[in-house]
Amino acid sequence: DHVKPSHTPEKWHFTEIFVVAVVLGGVAVVSSLLLLYWGLNTNEPTSILKKFGMSELDYAQVCTMIYLKVSLSDFLTVFAARTTGPFFSRLPSYHLGIAALVAMGASTGLSHYWDDILDLPEMKSLTWKWIGFVWAYCLVWFFLQDIIKALTYWALYKMNIGSEAHHQGLMQKKDKVVAKRDNRRALTHESVMKGESLAKASVRMTGRSTALQLDQDASAKYKSMSSSEIM
């Protein structure tokens, strides 16, 4: 897959991993249980699926419907889990794309031709209308899952938890080190140009001595150096 490398050393963030995994898995479980409840009640006059013009299902067809739903939603979860932002923020590699097409295509075909391919009475074939409904149902929940995932990462970052917060913290430390180094270079250059010691320049600039005092030989050496050599 296409992976964006971190600019800072990698570190395990188990809290972030655990929370995001629970969120992604929780959304998938809720969507599966809801579809199972609807599928088991298709014979009821008040069935919500009948309002969508769907036909009744027997128990074997409900099993096939859940098989298709889990097969699709579990692979779609991979696309949601691979990014911290929206799923489209980083395109997948063609390897992952081919794997998705093969896996979801196979489960879709099996759901329709189950009776012709497999002699397993526990499950029965679904019509293309039902297969289309399951696909639409999974896609709707996938978009919802991705939105909830992005909000979860945002909340973890606000609480200073996770990889993004760790990266920002390291970058802030780096900025402080760079700023301190640049200030030291500027102070060294200015003190040499004025012919004063670093300690005296430090007191003049900061009110306290934070620089090392150069001995006479080192001071003479710096005075003979050009500006570019000092920087």
Image (cartoon, grey):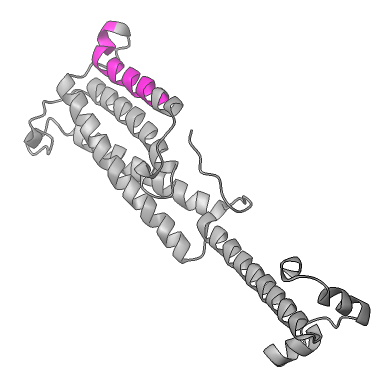
Residue 4 appears in view? yes
Against 217, residue 60 (above or below) is: above
- Counting labels gives 0
* Magenta stretch encompasses residue 105: yes
Residue name at image x 60 percent, y 50 percent: 12
Q: Nearer the viewer, residue 208 or 112?
A: 208
What are the residue bounds of the magenta stretch? Answer: 99-116
What x and y, as percent, mark residue 154? 41, 59
Residue 223 lies left or right of residue 19; in this view the side is right
Q: Main secondary structure of the magenta part?
A: helix
Q: Nearer the viewer, residue 30 or 214?
A: 214
Residue 88 lies left or right of residue 201; in this view the side is left
Residue name at image x 7 percent, y 31 percent: 53
Residue 122 appears in view? no
Q: Nearer the viewer, residue 162 or 50?
A: 162
Against 206, residue 6 (above or below) is: above
Against 96, residue 188 (above or below) is: below
What x and y, as percent, mark residue 36? 26, 34
- In the picture, residue 216 is in which quadrant? bottom right
Quadrant assignment for the C terminus: bottom right
- In the picture, residue 106 is in which quadrant? top left
What x and y, as percent, mark residue 96? 43, 28
* Magenta stretch encompasses residue 26: no
What x and y, as percent, mark residue 81? 43, 42
- In the picture, residue 187 is in which quadrant? bottom right
Residue name at image x 11 percent, y 25 percent: 55
